Each structure stands twice: as structure tokens, then as C-alpha cells.
Image (spheres, grey):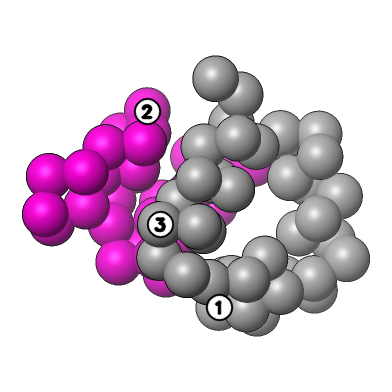
Amino acid sequence: MTLSQKVNMALAYKGMSQAALARAVDMSPANFNKRLRTGKFSQEELEKIAAALGGEYVFGFNFPDGTKI
């Protein structure tokens, strides 16, 4: 599973749009979408994304209810 697929699955799980997530991590929606297509995020950015989604990033997204993506 690609990083982009994981982010999109986490977005679907949380019911959040890409644009809302982009704003939550201080990126423009266009820049976030571009980065998502290429799958190029730093570890720090992935941690911010996970936090904005209410989870944590440890080579994937982990949520308090035990769901892992």
C-alpha cells in the first residue's frame, strides 16, 4: 500500500477532506495534493498529518480505537 493510499484511507476513516487536512497542517490544498500524488512527505509532516487526524504515525496511522492504516 502506498503512502498516498494510506493517507486517503485515514481521511475516509475520519471523514475529512484533503483540503481540510491540508489547512490543518498549514499547507495549501494544491500543495498538499501535489505532495500526496508524489508521496513525498517528511516524517515530521506525516506526524502532523496523523495528529490532525487524531492519530499517530508510526510507519502507518494508528488510532485510539486500535484501527491501523
Asked whether the residues under the numbered discs 3 and 1 touch, taking CB atoms below 8 Å apart as contact, a structural biologist would say: no
- Residue drawn at x 51%, y 58% is 11
Q: Which numbered disc covers residue 35?
A: none
Secondary structure of residue under mark 3: helix
- Examine the rendered structure and indicate whether residue 23 appears above or below residue 1: below
Pick whichever, 8 or 47, lies toward us.
8
Q: Is residue 48 magenta?
A: yes
Q: Does residue 15 appear left or right of residue 66 in this picture? A: right
Which label sits on residue 59?
2
* Residue sitting farthest toward the top: 1
Residue 31 on the magenta segment: no
Q: What range of the chain is rendered magenta?
A: 41-69
**Quadrant that contains the C terminus:** top left
- Residue drawn at x 50%, y 45% is 9
Q: Which residue type does callout 3 highlight? A: Tyr
Horizontal arrangement in the rendering, residue 15 relative to residue 23 (left or right): left
**x%, y% of residue 19?**
71, 74
- Dot 3 or dot 1: first in sequence order is 3
- Indicate which disc residue 13 carries: 3
Q: Is residue 23 left or right of residue 6?
A: right
Question: Disc 1 designates what residue?
Answer: 24
Could you give the CA–CA distance between mark 1 and mark 2, rounded to whole angstroms?
A: 21 Å
- Give the structural element (helix, strand or loop) at label 2: loop
